[in-house]
Image: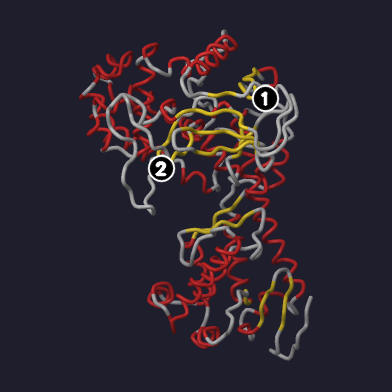
Amino acid sequence: MATQDDFQQRSGDFMDWLRQQEGVTISSKIALVDLRSEGRGRAVVATEDIEDDEKLFEIPRYLIMDIKSSDLRKHIRSDLDSLEPWQQTVLVMIYESGKENTSRWFPYWQVLPECVDHLLINWSHKELEELRGSSVLNRIGKEETDRAFAERMLPIVTKHPDLFGIYADGFKGSDVQATLLELAHRMAGVMMAYAFDVEEDSFLLSDSDSGDSLEEVQDEDEVKIIKGMVPLADMLNASGPEHNASISYGERELMMSSNGPIKAGGEILITFGGLPRSDLLRRYGYIDKAHIPYDVVELSFSNIREIVAATFHFTEQEMNLRTQGDRFGIRRKIERLIESVHSEEGDYQGSIFEEAYDVAAKPSRSGFFPLPLVCTIWLLVAEDAEVEALKATRPLKPRMNLKVAWVLRAVLANRQKDYPTSIDEDEKMLEQTDLPVRLRLAVEVRLGEKMILHAALEYFRLMDQKLPGGLDNWLDNSVTTTFLEGEEVVFEKTAGIENEAK
């Protein structure tokens, strides 16, 4: 893999190799450049003005490094079939890098990093403590990954050590598990940061190495996604909504095209989609301010359930009835409502009684809080009379009554306590110019999540001011017909107040 001393030479050798491969086309208007002077690595830039929808490059299927194109498949096909798709790609990467210059992709390996430094899976326990409170800690999965490598990949490499070239001696040694874990984590990190999701049946191409057809008969609803390392495509850096290139798949090739004009000297950028910065850090080892609008805070259903039970003095049996039953057939009706809203907005936010819900920095069109979250709390707190009344409503309109609002405020306030530092403390830390890189990344992520909680609680603070006596005073007073719509408190005829807004 690449080192720093011959950085540009390796870039040139890689591009020369790539242009010589059958089926590869690369626009004369782009170049792979060195951005180390800006504290970055490689990037692809426009050397001339590029028009909208102009093809930038095309990579044939056989050059995408994955389970389908590597000849490892012809040696241990049955063993590979026992692995998950991402595990297959990791093993292929170990195999191909172990072959060194006999690998088809040897020049490609020379421009890939030895490891991806700041992926969360590589952080120490002390470093991860700085992310305490963030639900991203529950998604790192290092123990599960170690177990998968030890239980599923270790038997393969010890059974066929000589297949793995320069790693063969390590796979024969007494410390083979440690050797595999170190190597597999390095490869998995590179895969997470650089690989693309590829539909296994996107390409209708014969595998000349194994003699097997890449076209596999599958149900249309069961498309298998595999991870593939795509030369040159993974040299493109990513941005938030400001990307100017996009990927598409033909029957035998992957194509990268511009999705808008690009001026000469401009960097060609793809997008990872609307990922929160916590997931950018977990999956790619960096964060980007352009993704601040996509930050989220996760609220767990277990915490919601505990607060509802404690607030309304529901027994465990009563809570089970409210979560598992379908009182008066309303549950399915609400599920259909959520499905219709998701269909209209094109933004899936989950369903009722999910394990957790995301409150986003950027609200959806249906409101500041996800509709499934509001409906879940409503189903937990609603009395039978309310359920019957809602069932008769045509059309069913999503509204948040004050009981739901009170519970949601309590859940948010409780969630805020999970973070050991305050917003002010984090902001002061970020003013330090000598803050270690990983600590700065952690503070940025946790501060973003706290800002969402602060904004959500501010929403309820303003609501509290609009309600006579405040939200607490209204918890037990005629709340069944008092609703919130958007940012407006709407009172219907109840408790002597008629249609009083704001």
Query: Mark 2 belongs to which amino acid?
Result: Ile
Disc 2 to disc 1, C-alpha distance: 29 Å
Give the left or right position of residue 195, taking residue 77 as reference: right
Give the left or right position of residue 102, taking residue 436 as reference: left
Q: In terms of secondary structure, where does tag 2 sit? A: strand
Q: Residue at x 38, y 76 (%)?
A: 317
Decide: is 360 above or below 319: above
Residue 54, position as x, y percentages in the image = 65, 33
Decide: is 378 above or below 453: below
> Which of the labelled discs sits on residue 45, or is there none?
1
Q: Residue at x 38, y 16 (%)?
A: 103
Q: Earlier in the sequence, mark 2 or mark 1?
A: 1
Residue 287, position as x, y percentages in the image = 62, 36
Residue 328, position as x, y percentages in the image = 44, 84
The local crowd at label 2, few if under 14, some if 14 to 19, many if 20 or more residues have their Cα within 10 Å, is some
Query: Mark 1 belongs to which amino acid?
Result: Val
